[in-house]
């Protein structure tokens, strides 16, 4: 049985192995998160809190955070597929 998404494409089966592009798409969001952290840190040791008027996150860190959020879709699809797989394994008793 093939299920179609709203765009008319086939939905990914949870048991389908990932190819290189699938694994690369999972690497994007954590990489952007790391880049946002490094950019916000600015290469300087932050031993003291900034003054109340200063915000330690500049424009590049915000951009990396947003890109990390936009690239969360593969992680959400993976989590959804794993949840569906575990939900089906709980509901469907295995025959002997």
Image (cartoon, rainbow, N blue to C red):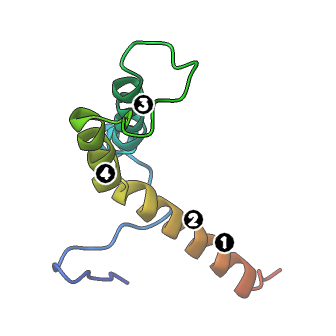
Q: Where is residue 96 in the image (x, y as percent from the top left)?
A: 83, 80
Question: Residue at the location (34% across, 53% down)?
Answer: 69
Q: Where is residue 86 in the image (x, y as percent from the top left)?
A: 66, 71
Residue sticking out furthest to the right: 96
Location of residue 9 (image quadrant):
bottom left
Location of residue 26 (image quadrant):
top left
Compare residues 17 and 82 and report the one nearer the observer.
82
**Residue topped by disc 4:** 71
Secondary structure at badge 4 equals: loop
Instruction: Say how many tags the image has.
Output: 4
Compare residues 29 and 45 and report the one nearer the observer.
45
Q: Nearer the viewer, mark 3 or mark 2?
A: 3
Of the two numbered discs 3 and 2 on the same chain, state the one appearing first in sequence.
3
Secondary structure at badge 1 equals: helix
Of the two numbered discs 1 and 4 on the same chain, state the one appearing first in sequence.
4
Compare residues 91 and 64 and report the one nearer the observer.
64
- Spatial CA span between label 3 and label 2: 29 Å
Q: In the image, is residue 25 above or below residue 94?
A: above
- Spatial CA span between label 1 and label 3: 34 Å
Q: Nearer the viewer, mark 4 or mark 3?
A: 3
**Residue topped by disc 3:** 37
**Residue topped by disc 2:** 82
**Residue topped by disc 1:** 86
Q: Do the residues labelled 3 and 2 touch (CB within 8 Å)?
A: no
Of the two numbered discs 1 and 3 on the same chain, state the one appearing first in sequence.
3
């Amino acid at each position: 049985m093939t299920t179609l998404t709203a765009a008319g494409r086939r939905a990914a089966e949870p048991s389908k192995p990932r190819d290189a592009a699938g694994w690369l798409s999972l690497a994007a969001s954590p990489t952007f998160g790391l880049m946002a952290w490094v950019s916000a840190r600015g290469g300087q040791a932050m031993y003291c809190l900034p003054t109340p008027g200063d915000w330690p996150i500049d424009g590049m860190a915000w951009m990396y955070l947003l890109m990390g959020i936009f690239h969360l879709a593969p992680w959400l699809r993976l989590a959804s597929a794993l949840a569906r797989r575990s939900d089906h394994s709980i509901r469907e008793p295995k025959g002997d």
